Image (spheres, helix red, strand yellow):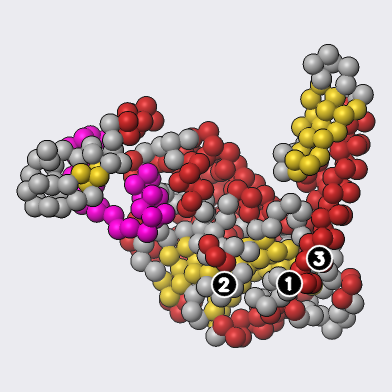
Amino acid sequence: MLTEFFLERAHIEPSADGASYSGTVPELPEIYIEAATVEQCQSKLAEAIKNLLADEAGQANNSSRSNGAGDKQIDLANNDFDDQAKEPDEIQGIFIPGLDEIIYEKRGQIALVTINRPDHYNSYTSATLIEMAAAFRDARRDENIAVLVLTGAGDKAFCAGSDVTEHSEKHIDNTKEFRRWFDLFIEAMESLRQVGKPTIARINGIVASGGNGWNLACDMAVAADHAKFVQIETKFGMISAGGPAEWLPLAIGERHAREMLLTCEPVSANKALLWGLVNDVVPYRELDNAVRTLCQKLIDRFPESIRHTREQLSYWKDLAWKSCIEQNREWLASQFAGAEAREGLRALAEHREIDYRAFRKAALRLGPVSSLEDQTQSTEKGFDVERVCSACGASGFPASYQFCGVCGEKLE
């Protein structure tokens, strides 16, 4: 359960004089324990975590009842999923304490995980990943759960990928922090893939970049007819290295995968159905009924037969994932230390257009940025300071540009 999840992350350290031990939990800063032995420290930490979870879960449940959090956005969560429905007190949602970026509920034999950041198109941050991993692990351990449904809050987006602001502020030119973030991503993705039960993506809107990774990680997907699928990595100086690049060729074929990943053109829900990216497309008002019907079909099958069949079906996805994921960590870290990711992410965060041709010309004249040190030097020289061409009046060029990207004249 969640107690074990946080206990695994606890830090136990000896005091300066070696006479005692202190215990802390990074995700739960309220907890600080001192004890004479490691065993006593572990025991006290477990008790403190358990008490904190109970207190905050109660507060979260009371808050959700008072403000209706999540109830108005997803009708799926308000329905009883089997004929033998439990009493309301027995099917209360489970909320991860101290973090509020997902909604985790159990309704009958179905676990519903909702990325709850609708104002950010349900993009995920480090905190979101921690919560998602905890929810997926809990669903795996709970023998009463037969199916897991993953969705996003509201009707605009399923998931728009990783949070651009967090990347821009914390991960550009900071490979150490990026690798820490990527570890959280891997942990959450592995927790979903290893849940041991059928998983369904409830596609309620835009699916972008890493969001498509969560879709592809699920066994099946049902989409509303207004949903769109798009990979934006090459448009903003990044690379797809967390599922889509490995799994899209398996799901929709290599040609279609290349089209999505290289052109960044959106794919409609109907085309996604035609290509095999989703199992069904329905009007948005029918989405919950369609997902619920699919859940019932899976519940009415032998659980161990499903478990082993899923393992067999996952062979090629597992092979692709395990062959690439460690290399992908380094590729992405290197990309985030480069000029392309800096320009792309900042343009995305600032909602401005990118002059790709001017960037190409500048890159040819300046040569490739081969290291973090070289990139830092470029930044110190004013790479992000805009320059204006006195010949044609074009503006917006980084200070490192030597020539105008429009007319080709030398910049003063």
Query: Which residue is label 1 attached to?
Result: 67
Is residue 298 visible in the rendered image? The answer is no
Vertical position of residue 193 compared to residue 74: above or below: above
- 155 with respect to 412 (left or right): right
The span from disc 3 to disc 1 (Cα, nearest Å) is 10 Å
Disc 3 and disc 1 in contact, CB within 8 angstroms = no
- Residue 113 % position (x, y): 69, 64
Q: Position of residue 264 (x, y in %)?
A: 36, 62
Q: Is residue 364 magenta?
A: yes
- State whether the magenta stretch is mostly helix, strand or loop: helix
Q: Residues within 10 Å of mark 2 (few under 14, many from 20)?
A: many
Residue tagged by mark 2? 203
Residue stretch rendered in magenta on the structure: 341-369
Q: Earlier in the sequence, mark 3 or mark 1?
A: 3
Residue displayed at 56% across by 75% down: 155
Q: Magenta stretch containing residue 407, yes or no?
A: no
Q: Amino acid at mark 1?
A: Asn
Which tag is nearer the camera, tag 3 or tag 2?
3
- Helix, strand or loop at label 3? It is helix
Q: In the image, what residue occupies the spot 93% across and 31% down? A: 40
Q: Position of residue 145 (x, y in %)?
A: 80, 66
At label 3, the amino acid type is Asn
Q: Crowding near pointer 3: few (<14 within 10 Å), some, many (20+)?
A: some
Kind of residue at badge 2? Ile
Mark 2 → mark 1, Cα distance in angstroms = 25 Å
Which residue is most to the top?
Answer: 17
Q: Which residue is mark 3?
A: 61
> Distance of mark 3 from mark 2, alpha carbons?
26 Å
Residue drawn 49% across and 69% down? 206
Callout 1 crowding tier (Cα within 10 Å): few <14, some 14–19, many ≥20: few
> x%, y% of residue 28?
76, 43
Q: Of helix, strand and loop, which one carries label 2? A: strand
